Image: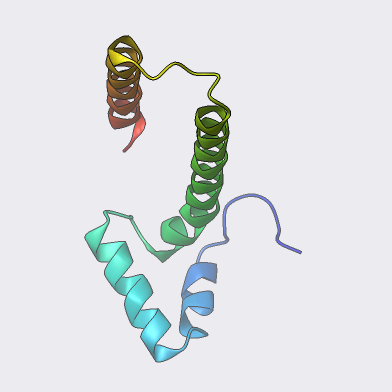
Amino acid sequence: MLSEGPLAEGQDANRHHFLPGSLKAFVETQTANKSYGNVSEYFRRLPQEAQKQEQYARLEALLLEDLASKRIKLDDQFRQNLVAKVDRVLETQAVEEP
């Protein structure tokens, strides 16, 4: 079971050394290229990113379900409203991301 709270100092380094060479190199590249402060931050953010992906997948499934049901009238007004909503969501996400 995973413990809660931040990793103890040096704990990330110990876990990092247990990774196979190719995974260790991948983690180091991700840490450097995606502006993570260190390996611990990378590993802390993985569950958050996985949760976000699951939320997007669920939203996509709901949208596809509604589209398939023909309950939504797909006209120009719908498309304009959808584009406006997507733009607002993207703007909000851009502000929230570090």
Q: Quadrant of the N terminus?
A: bottom right
Residue lying at the far top of the rendered structure: 77
- Say which residue appears at 29% left-offset and 26% top-offset: 95
- Depicted 68 relative to depicted 6: above or below: above
- Depicted 80 relative to depicted 38: above or below: above
Residue lying at the far right of the rendered structure: 1
- Say which residue appears at 52% left-offset and 52% top-offset: 50
Residue lying at the far bottom of the rendered structure: 21
User: Residue 23 or 88: which is nearer the viewer?
Assistant: 88
User: Residue 72 or 10: which is nearer the viewer?
Assistant: 72
Count of numbered circles in the view: 0
Q: Quadrant of residue 91?
A: top left
Residue lying at the far front of the rendered structure: 70
User: Residue 89 or 69: which is nearer the viewer?
Assistant: 69
Q: Quadrant of the C terminus?
A: top left
x, y percentage for residue 25?
A: 33, 81
- Say which residue appears at 68% left-offset and 51% top-offset: 4
x, y percentage for residue 22?
A: 37, 86
x, y percentage for residue 45?
A: 47, 52
- Say which residue appears at 57% left-offset and 40% top-offset: 58
Q: Quadrant of residue 96?
A: top left
